[in-house]
Image: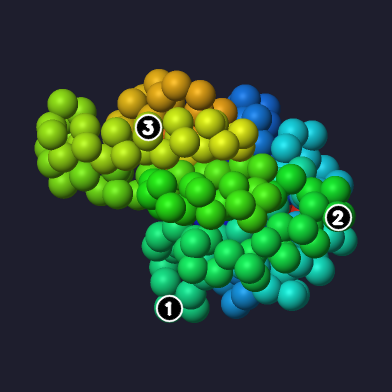
Amino acid sequence: MNIDHIATIRQARRTYEPDPVWAATEAQLGGADGITVHLREDRRHIQDRDVHRLAEMVHVKLNLEMAATPEMIEIACDVKPQLAMLVPEGRAEITTEGGLDVAGQRDHLAEVVARLGEAGLAVSAFIDAEPPQVEAAAACGFTVCEVHTGPYAHAFFSKGRDADHPAIRDELERVRHAGELIRQAGMRFNAGHALTYANVQPIAALAGVQELHIGHSIVSRAVLTGLREAVAEMKRLMREAAARPLPQGCG
């Protein structure tokens, strides 16, 4: 589970809640096999302290999404997450908008992968479902590729949410084929981005997919499924206090 948006809510008020570490604990209790955070250059949600605390507290795999910059490489080598995932990053984007162009910066990324590997980290590339990107990732020494499922999710949403629609089947086939090439190259096949409760199953059913990284949809569902209980608890506290006599001198 990606818990970035827990921190987004917190940072909206620059306060201490909701706590991403607490959210990671709840996610683990719910069955999450890993926790993902993206420490962005502008620190718009996850903060450095969050990453260090999560590294100490998370009992499952911690996946640190990061740009391939000297600052982030240094942080990853210090924190030592179980997985470092290299992603493209732009200040103006709302969220990651596409896969990493591994083929276009092969020499630089090979050096980054080597540096992270020397620190004992498994390294993943977030790539579009394109054979040249898979080939380049293998050449750079990546151990994992996460296939960008955004185009599939967009087709699913825009084409009537019908998994049998040709456009949706085409995007699903692109992901499937990329996954096959990834596995043939000896890398682990992961997938993620814009997956929801409605569109996740065709991706989850693909042969050889090891992990699905999902965040926004789970947080969105949690806001609604947990809101009734949260309001009821606040109301209970108010009524409990109103029923108690005031301390002397407070009337």
- Dot 1 or dot 3: first in sequence order is 1
Q: Is residue 107 at least partly visible in the picture?
A: yes
- Dot 2 or dot 3: first in sequence order is 2
Query: In terms of image quadrants, where is residue 41?
Result: bottom right
Quadrant of the rendering where the N terminus is positioned: top right
> Relative to 191, is 151 above or below?
below
Check disc 1 and report the residue beneath it. Answer: 92
- In the rendered structure, the answer to whether residue 224 lies left or right of residue 250 reads left
Quadrant of the rendering where the C terminus is positioned: bottom right
Q: Where residue 249 appears, x then y in whole percent?
A: 77, 64
Q: Secondary structure at mark 2?
A: helix
Q: CA distance from mark 2 to mark 3?
A: 31 Å
User: Amino acid type of disc 1?
Assistant: Ala
**The label number, if any, that marks residue 78 in the structure image:** none
Q: Where residue 58 appears, x then y in whole percent?
A: 78, 40
Q: CA distance from mark 1 to mark 3?
A: 31 Å
Q: Are marks 2 and 3 in contact (CB under 8 Å)?
A: no
**The label number, if any, that marks residue 118 in the structure image:** 2
> Relative to 58, is 154 above or below?
below
In this orientation, which residue lies closer to the viewer: 43 or 120? 120
In this orientation, which residue lies closer to the viewer: 182 or 206? 182
Q: Where residue 227 appears, x then y in whole percent?
A: 46, 41
User: Amino acid type of disc 2?
Assistant: Glu
Check disc 3 and report the residue beneath it. Answer: 176
Label 3 environment density (alpha carbons within 10 Å; few <14, some 14–19, many ≥20)? many
Q: Is residue 219 at least partly visible in the picture?
A: no
